[in-house]
Amino acid sequence: QVQLVESGGNLVQSGRSLQLSCAASGFSFWVYGGSWYRQAPGKERELVARMFPTTYGTTYGASVQGRFTISRDNDKNTLDLQMYSLKPEDTAVYYCNVRYSGRDFWGQGTQVTVSS
């Protein structure tokens, strides 16, 4: 059974850093890769960062390129998102995602709020 549980969301001031973590069960992030998405109120869900399977290749959304870093702990089977230089426009619910057996699975989300 595929499960994703995000943690680490918080209220932070603009310019500060925050790390999110996604704990997975029922599959391996090393084998399937994984992604972080976010959704702000009134906006569509957007890709933040993706780590590809069986490599350390990554890709980032244009708005976070150079400020966010996605990483994977193969022993713990977690997918982390380190966020630097946070801006108020980064405020959103952040979701962990994996595409497994042709289906998208999502965590429950974790709220990140950046105050100006």
Image (spheres, rainbow, N blue to C red):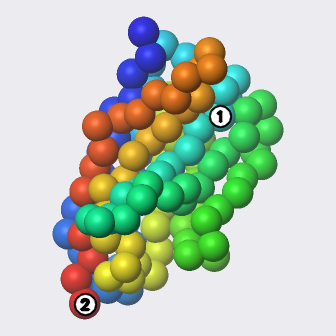
Drawn side of residue 78 relative to residue 99, left or right: left
- Secondary structure under badge 2? loop
Q: Is residue 110 visible?
A: yes
Residue 52 x %, y %: 72, 40
- Precedes in sequence: disc 1 or disc 2: 1
Residue that appears at 65% across and 34% down: 33
Please tell me whether residue 88 is drawn above or below residue 96 in the rendered image: below
Relative to the observer, which residue lies in front, 80 or 32?
Answer: 32
Q: x, y percentage for residue 13?
A: 25, 82
The furthest residue to the bottom: 116
- For image coordinates 34% across by 41% down, the residue present is 6
Task: Give the left or right position of residue 53, taking residue 110 as reference.
Answer: right
Q: Where residue 38 sits: x, y (%)?
A: 41, 57
Tell me if residue 71 comes above or below residue 6 in the rendering. Answer: below
Which residue is label 1 attached to? 33
- Point out residue 1 in the picture as x, y percentages from the top left corner: 42, 9
- Is residue 19 in sight in this rendering? no
Query: Is 4 on the left-hand or right-hand side of 37?
Result: left
Quadrant of residue 74 within the rendered picture: top right
What residue is shown with label 2? 116
Disc 2 residue type (three-letter)? Ser
